[in-house]
Image: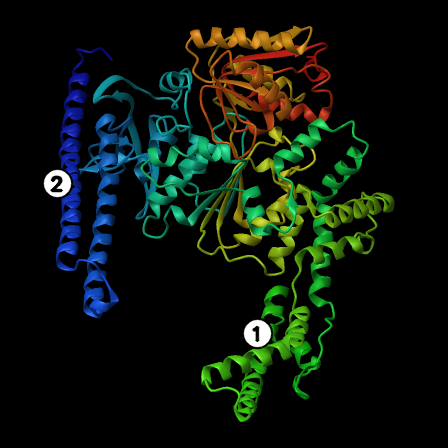
Amino acid sequence: MKRNDLEWKLEDQWLEAVLKEARKQFNEKVDFKEKFKKDAIETQRQLWQDIGSVSIANGMDQIVEFMEFIDAMKIQKRKHELTRKFQEKYERIVESPYFGRIDFLENGEEREEKFYIGISNLTDDNYDFLVYDWRAPVSSMFYDYEIGEAMFECPEGIVEGELTLKRQYKISNGKIDYMFDSNIKIDDEILQDILSKNTDNKMKTIITTIQREQNKVIRNEEYKNLIVQGPAGSGKTSVALHRIAYLLYKHRDKITAQNIVIFSPNEIFNDYISNVLPELGEDNMNQTTFKEYMHNALGNGLKKENYCEMMEYILSSKDEPSYGERINNIKYKASMEFIDVLKRYVVYVENLDREFTDINLRGQLIVSSEEINKLFFEDYSNLPLKRRLQKIRERVLFLIEPYEKLWIEDVSHELKETGSYIDKNEINEKSKARVKAEMRELYYSIDKMTEFDLVDIYKKLFQNLDYFAKRSDSEYSEQRIHEIKRYTLENLRGKLLNYEDQAPLLYLKGVLGDLPKTSSIKYVIIDEAQDYTPLQYEILKQLFSHADMTILGDLNQSINPFMNVGEYKNIANIFPEDNTCIINLSKSYRSTMEITRFSRRLLNKEITDGCVERSGEEPLLVGFSNDEAIKERLLSDIKIYKEKGHKSIGIITRTKKEAQEVFNFLKDKVDVKGIMKDDDEYVSGILVIPAYLAKGLEFDVALIYNVGNENYKSEEERLLLYTACTRALHVLDVYYSGKLTPLLNF
């Protein structure tokens, strides 16, 4: 549209009207904020003047008055915080109040209605909408329809009609930079403009470019469980975060951010995505990783290997004599077969006869072993094992208590008769101490009888693994089962808990009743779903049985070849078919067409997923005589790409050891950061990082370090290399020394 066009004039007038209202409301919020601040200062001044120093010696009246002041200050703080959030909302609106407009003619109406769509609702004093939140029901048409027939669903039902106009804007600093009418999907101009930019920070919102297939995931509430499969760069994580924002908007009276948890691949990624929800005006949800949750739940009794340490072992220890044994161990404990073993073992443990004994005190029977057995197998049979044992212990101690008190009274009488004690309190304390000492052995036997030792329970599984693993269709021979049994028991005796043993232990802990309730969590988001094993999904379902789940992943990015979901059908039995929907995102938006084509050839199979039509340079594949020459070229290329204006450059290595070597070479020559552990903080700029920590991240330029035949030499590393290459937005350079990996011989 031309600048002198009447339409431009009308749009400028509308924008000015919207901004005027937004500025007015912004100033009101600032005034409220200042008022609350002054009130808080005045309340604190009155508190000091009227009450002064609080002391119990001044009586209860002073304390009551003090608590009233504290309550008033808490209310003021909440009001101040709410006003601050509103102020931030209006700051965003004033900067860019909307990005889209649709004109909709509802069936049966004579005139179409205009709907401007932005990051938040904006209404005037008459409660007329000037801007609609992108999550509002009517806004869904902006993402779902072209010009023509359209519909949206609202609380009153389905509204049908026709879209007569669909317009997109770029507004910054309160001015329209450009706008255009679109009768096609949200692609090309605005999307291309956004995708072509360099990235220098954390993940951003995508509300201006949400695609129809992405919107389907964001707003889907038909199914309790959503499994979203999409290629690298299809926006899975962004979709998950915008889905959270949508749920918080739609169910604001029922849920808060504290009712939602997202499981991310690592802490780096948690930090990387931490700005998205605040940018959308929402508080961040609970963020964790499976490793973090698991390590906290399992406690500190054993030395626990973390995920990065396992990945380093898989990638770096192939020449060790025990490597094959360890890999067999990992594969077995990530298998569907082992889940069946665990389930059979749980049934066995819960029905195992216990060595309950009679409880006698001073020659008198308090409770018999038969009565305790009845409590265990009948009265408390509906409880998991640990809760049953706890209940029995509580019951036995309850029955003992009156006899113990009577014994203390008898001893007190004896001591009093001796005449050696004058003080009554001293007699009581001496009596209690003597009885406790006499009962020490009885208490010990009760503790042993009701003991719940999780590691011992796990050890006993492997001591008898041959029995529980017996099945005619097993993929594992008796010899391999015996090796797994021996290997596991050796590690447990050495107080070492390998990563592959932690999920089984957590599963037993949960199913036997030793994990806290998570009923406050209503929605669970699982990102990078391909890297979870079926057993981990069993655990998540066990932990969050009442929550809705959104599971997002890409089977082609399974960075661990031995611990992954395999296929989504492997978790079909965990999530009921009638309440589960699998949605496929079919297009990649991250990389240029050239990078996408190069990366997909790595998969060595036909890929039908689409990609955005954004052209760039062909990926560069360069060979060198040795690793030092690669490092020198890295240094040279980093300087070139920085001069070209690229803000984020990722140097992606195969292992942590390589990452450390490259970082040490570069650190005194260029401003570079290194991420070596999964709990390191995300940093932007020039970054050295192992491939298995880079998943989910993206860079303007990805420089893949040494894909020589000595590094990437096995089929198991194909998807790791694919994941590394798909981190690139605009430029992908791949370096190798010696011979090129056969994975790239295409």
- Classify residue 7 as left or right of residue 569: left
User: To which residue does mark 2 refer?
Assistant: 125
Q: Residues within 10 Å of mark 2 (few under 14, many from 20)?
A: few
Residue 180 horizontal/vertical position (percent): 29, 18
Q: How is the image coloured?
A: rainbow
Q: Quadrant of the N terminus?
A: top left
* Looking at the image, residue 219 lies above or below residue 651: below
Query: Residue at the spot x=15%, y=31% of the render?
Result: 23
Mark number, residue 166:
none
Residue 103 horizontal/vertical position (percent): 25, 29
Helix or strand or loop: what does disc 1 sit on?
A: helix
- Classify residue 657 as left or right of residue 344: left
Q: Nearer the viewer, mark 2 or mark 1?
A: 1
Q: Amino acid at mark 1?
A: Glu
- Is residue 160 among the parts visible in the rendering? no
- Residue 643, by quadrant, is top left
Query: Residue at the spot x=55%, y=21% of the render?
Result: 726
Residue 652 horizontal/vertical position (percent): 57, 20
User: To which residue does mark 1 refer?
Assistant: 394
